[in-house]
Image (cartoon, rainbow, N blue to C red):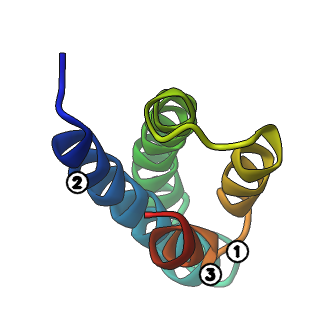
Amino acid sequence: MFTVELSVKTFRFISTLEAISFLVLLGIAMPLKYIWHMPQMVQIVGMAHGVLFVLYVGGALYMYKKLNWSVTDLLIVVMCSILPFGPFYVERKYL
């Protein structure tokens, strides 16, 4: 359906958004919740990050098939999704 080039661009975009949403969640929303008692930001950013995380993992599975990654590569890419700067590493190394 998609060309490989378009698939890589789409996954790169989702990867960037997922990484940024995670950093905003950890660096802005969580301090607002726990230091200044403003939990609303965590609800909003947390939901966005959750959706982007699911898209990232789904995109990683799709790229696994499209780019013929090994299972080890797939596991590294998925594990990078739980590290704050992990998706940026994936963009450099695997895309």
Distance of label 3 from label 1 (alpha carbons): 5 Å
User: Would you say 35 lies left or right of 61 here?
Assistant: right
**Residue 29 in view:** no
**Res. 87 image quadrant:** bottom right
List the residue tagged with mark 2.
9
* Image quarter in which the N terminus is found: top left
Mark 1 crowdedness (10 Å alpha carbons): few <14, some 14-19, many ≥20: few
Q: Position of residue 77 (x, y in %)?
A: 66, 54
Distance from Cα at disc 2 to Cα at disc 3 = 33 Å
Residue annotated with mark 3: 31
**For mark 3, does the 10 Å Cα neighbourhood hold few (<14), some (14 to 19), or many (20 or more) residues?**
some
Residue 6 spot, x, y in % from top left: 16, 43
Where does the C terminus fall, quadrant-wise? bottom left
Disc on the earlier residue, 2 or 1: 2
Q: Name the amino acid, label 1.
A: Tyr
- Residue under the image location 43 percent in, 32 percent down: 66
Q: Mark 1 points at which residue?
A: 34
**Dot 1: what SS?**
helix
Residue at left 17%, top 33%?
3
Q: Which of 50 and 81 is in front in this view?
A: 81
Do labels 3 and 1 touch, CB within 8 Å? yes
SS state under label 3 = helix
